[in-house]
Image (cartoon, helix red, strand yellow):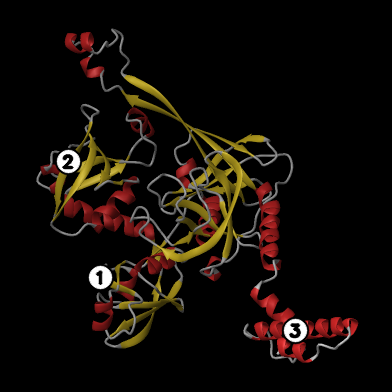
Amino acid sequence: MLNRMLISNRCISAPFFKKLMAGLLLAFTCTWIFTACAQQPAPSNKPSTATGSSQAAVRDVNPSPQPSTDLSSAIERVANKAIPAVVHIEVTEHQELANPYYAYKDNPFFRRFFGLPKNMPKKLQRELVGIGTGVIMDAEGHILTNYHVVGGATQIEVTLSDGTQYPATVVGVDPKTDLGVIKINTEKPLPFLTFTNSDQATVGQWVVAIGQSRGLDQTVTQGIISAKHRTGITDPGSYQDFLQTDAAINPGNSGGPLLTLDGQVIGINSEIASQSGGFEGIGFAIPSNMATHVAKALIAHGKVERGWVGVSAQDLTPDLAKSFGLALPKGALLAEVEKGGPADKAGIKKGDVVVSYQDKPVTDASDFRNDVANSPIGHQAQVGIWRDGKKQQISVTVGNLDDERKAVAAQVKERLGVVVRQLTVKEAEDYGLSLPKGVAVKWVDPKGPIGEAGFEVGDVILALDNQPVQGVDGFNEMMMAMPHHQKAVVLAISHKTGQSGYVQIEIS
């Protein structure tokens, strides 16, 4: 069109021609812009001019940097608010180990070829230093952290964000949830953080982690909640309901806070899944609801009392759910109901499926176990069960977990022919162990599985199938969880020689 016009208008004056060309060029350009912009998704239903549509389309294709700015400023606000209430924890653990060469002190061969000294000590001294993170919970100086940070410490030093240092004492620890509370005494009130409701956490929610990542104080990282209700991460005898996050968590972050963008604690960082020993995008935090429940109990009583109803539960598979007439494999199938226990007295039976507890849906066996454990002792709990294709509501009086411990210990004695006890402080020092790691054999039936394997009174059991034994309760629960007629490998220490080794047993 433009060439044809130029040819038919050869006699047009130069000024007029220049104006005409400019006008045509402008019209062509506007037409092209409008066409190009019209190909983009319409930003709104409101009528607009060609120029307005063009601008709106550009905004839609190239989003404003405002959301990014908002996120970065939110993280800055969280860091500024939380850092003063996040502390660096350094722990020192003194250990006394049995000298492995002491038995050969009079052997001339060993003395000659290994250069053993004449005056060889029977015990060796060792000092371990570790670091972790903690969250100040109140103005009085109570600090929440992980059990594995402070559980075996003989000396604890806390450093605040301003560099001041204070000695700390242990208020109480709970190995079952990997939580512990320590306390420092200061002359002035301390800044502290508040905890939010972790039940309202959502997958994809932005979170911020703060801690002493590999010893680097007050390291701030950000990410999202990747998943909820993660179980089976650590000791099967522990209470687990982890939040999974991709916020960078490294050694040293243990006990530090996982925070919402409002600056509230939604979890306590505890574990990482890693083959390298460092951050690989999979971290786990103890939900704030569990953490606060345990912390309050430790501050008030120095220990955690847990509810018990006397059942053994397992997860539902899709096939099991279908066989029970359930649409989804949600709930806890009761594999055992202890005779005379609270559930048995209330009329709950083996084979029932628990689908709700206190009007809250039960996802799996771990979820049910945690809900019962957090229930007040003596409380009338409403348990929703699925039986014979129908849902029923049964009221159960929550008992004390201490009663179950006695019952489990009796079952272990009958099944394995052994009774174990907690190690004394001196025994732990002699073997270089940190309490409550390991148990000592208190009584053994020579004809039982443990006795036939060669165990004697005084021997120490450290692990079962490479799972560390954490105290008497941990040992009993691990043994009861083992299937019948299955072989297991036990790591033990002989009370006679002080040497450790592996022994295979068959669980009846």
Residue in the image at 65% along x and 34% along y: 165
Q: In which quarter of the image is the C terminus?
A: bottom left
Residue 391 placement (x, y as % from top left): 35, 86
From the image, which quarter does the N terminus lie in? Answer: bottom right
Cβ atoms under marks 1 and 3 closer than 8 Å: no
- Badge 1 marks a residue whose secondary structure is strand
Name the residue carrying label 1.
335
> Identity of the amino acid at label 3?
Cys
Looking at the image, residue 265 sits to the left or right of residue 177; the answer is right
Mark 1 or mark 3: which is in front? 3
Q: 183 above or below 231? A: above
Label 2: how many Cα within 10 Å (few below 14, some 14–19, many 20+) = some
Callout 2, which amino acid? Val
Q: Which residue occupies the foreground of this view, 160 or 19?
A: 19
Q: Which of marks 2 and 3 is nearer the N terminus?
A: 3
Quadrant housing residue 107: top left
Q: Give the CA separation, mark 1 to mark 2.
A: 30 Å
Q: Earlier in the sequence, mark 1 or mark 2?
A: 1
Q: Name the residue under label 3.
A: 30
Regarding residue 63, the answer to whether it shows in the image is yes
Res 48 visible: no
Whole-number angstrom distance, CA of label 2 to CA of label 3? 86 Å
- Image point 39% across, 22% down: which residue? 125
- Under circle 3, the secondary element is helix
The 10 Å Cα crowd at callout 3, few under 14, some 14 to 19, many 20 or more, is: few
Q: Residue 503 carries which label?
A: 2
